[in-house]
Amino acid sequence: MSADGSVVELVVWSGALAREGVRRAALVIRDDRSHELTAPADAPDEPVRELGAFLHEPDGAVIRARLIGEVARSLDAGMLDEHIAYLTSDAALTSPFVQSFRVRETLPANPKAISAALTAHGIGRLEIKKRGVDVDPAAFRKKLTLRGDQEATLILARIGDQRRAILADRVPAA
């Protein structure tokens, strides 16, 4: 279960409390609304595909329940990397089980290239997310030039054997 993006609980229901046919469940609570995803077993992941127009970050409850594949299929998405819990798609679909980002551009994961792009877009406020790369976001931020009144999200990720930076805009939650 997660509440507003933070995983807060893991529950194992057994015996009389177990639901018929449900072996995996993710409960996501956002803004006083709840959404549940269930499955009879671990959901097989979707195949890896090239980065599309959207990147989706599954909620922690979905990851821990091993239901990433179920969410990927609902979004017509694939895995960005077989070992990283990021999904990608071209369709403008979203879900309460992911945070979605519209991809602006991809860059090498080096501060000089990223700073040039941030300056070109007038980005002065930047959220930094990472998966699969050994980077301290706070230390990385200090290497960047942030000027302007625009905002964006920078996603640092390992894709295959490459470290990439994805400049994106947060899509409002479903």
Image (cartoon, rainbow, N blue to C red):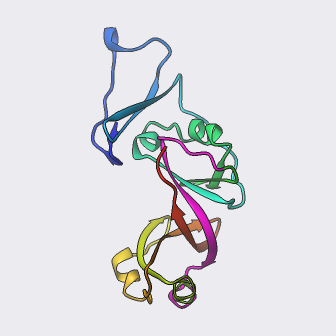
Q: Quadrant of the N terminus?
A: top left
Name the side, left or right, on which 9 lies relative to 136. left
Residue at 32% from the left image edge and 13% from the top image edge: 17
Rendered position, 134 above or below 123: above
Whole-percent x, y for residue 165 in the image: 56, 74
Whole-percent x, y for residue 155 in the image: 51, 68
Find residue 128 and report its image quarter. Answer: bottom left
Between 150 and 116, which is closer to the camera in this rendering?
150
Name the side, left or right, on which 12 lies relative to 104. left
Name the residue furthest top: 16
Name the side, left or right, on which 172 lies relative to 14. right
How many circles with numbers are drawn on the protein? 0
Residue at 57% from the left image edge and 34% from the top image edge: 43
Residue at 41% from the left image edge and 14% from the top image edge: 19
Name the residue furthest left: 8
Which residues are the magenta region? 92-113
Whole-percent x, y for residue 152 in the image: 48, 71
Whole-percent x, y for residue 82 in the image: 62, 53
Rendered position, 95 above or below 126: above
Residue 125 forms part of the magenta stretch = no
Find residue 141 and report its image quarter. Answer: bottom left
Residue at 46% from the left image edge and 66% from the top image edge: 130
Rendered position, 97 above or below 161: above
Rendered position, 9 above or below 13: below
Residue 112 forms part of the magenta stretch = yes
